[in-house]
Image (cartoon, helix red, strand yellow):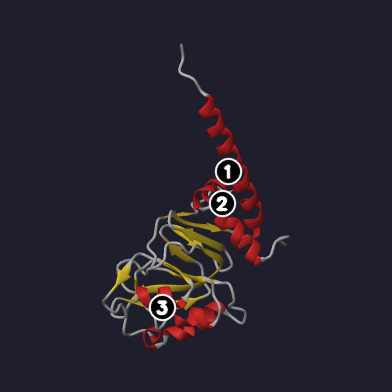
Amino acid sequence: MSSHDGADQAAWAARLGCAALVDAMGRLHGHRAHILALSSPDPTRPLFGPAATVAFLPHRDDLPQSKTDFGEFFYQAVGDDPGGKVLVLSSGGYRDASHGGGVKLSRIAHHGLAGVLADGRLRDFAELRDHGFATWCRGEATHWGGDTVMPYAAGVAVEVAGVCVVPGDYVYADRTGAVVIPHASLERVLQEADRVEAEDADFAARVARERPPA
């Protein structure tokens, strides 16, 4: 169990930034954990918290999921203790399709989630910014995406930009990209990222003292 609470961990991760966390993950794990830079209605807001997942698939009108409201999947994903979680939406293979907008995702604000990370586009950036949570996605959309993708399952492992995200994994995102950290590794990754930062500072100091060869 971590010796730090969620607020401490969020501040710790934000101080380190995505690159140091990705480097730390590379030292401690052998699998891909980094996601390249995403878009946000407010890039000054980093995103941090445990993942609550909804898997999207290409739309099919013969499946019962096509008639199921997104809200049902949302509440299945976040469970009884939604505060501080990150809603993670996979793309269903269509990263340019809208996966939601300001009204649908207002549930994130109402239930105190940290924010959303979507492997597709989202609508209503102005509304999402005003809701106050962190939003990271593939960009803003205008067209409704329900004719292209649909939520299919909640609380399952999903793929986001080639990275496996399991419910409970910690997600961090800022303007440089995102990283997915296994729940059990969070404290070790934060500590290792501190070492990465210290080593980088030491190397920068040595570079500053270098002189051209005679």
Q: Residues within 10 Å of mark 3 (few under 14, many from 20)?
A: many
Q: Residue 210 versus residue 162: which sits nearer the camera?
A: 210
Q: Earlier in the sequence, mark 3 or mark 1?
A: 3
Using the image, determine if residue 137 lies above or below residue 146. above
Q: Residue drawn at (36%, 68%), measured in percent from left and top?
A: 120
Towards the viewer: 136 or 92: 136
- In the picture, measured across the screen, residue 33 lies left or right of residue 42, that is right
Residue placed at 40% from the left, 56% from the top? 37
Of labels 3 and 2, earlier in sequence is 2
Q: Where is residue 7 in the image (x, y as percent from the top left)?
A: 63, 66
Q: How many marks?
A: 3
Q: In this view, does 102 lie to the left or right of 209?
A: left
Q: Quadrant of the N terminus?
A: bottom right
Q: Distance between the residues labelled 3 and 2?
A: 33 Å
Asked if residue 39 can be seen in this view, the reply is yes
Residue under label 1, please give it: 197
Residue 15 image label: none
What x and y, as percent, mark residue 118? Answer: 41, 68
Q: What residue type is labelled 1?
A: Glu
Query: Pointer 1 and pointer 2: residues touching (CB < 8 Å)?
Result: yes
The quarter holding residue 43 reads bottom left
| Residue shown at the point (66%, 55%) measured from the top left | 187
Helix, strand, or loop for circle 1?
A: helix
Residue 75 horizontal side relative to residue 149, left or right: right
Residue assigned mark 3: 151
Nearer to us in this view, 168 or 42: 42
Query: Residue at label 2?
Result: 16
Circle 2 — which element? helix
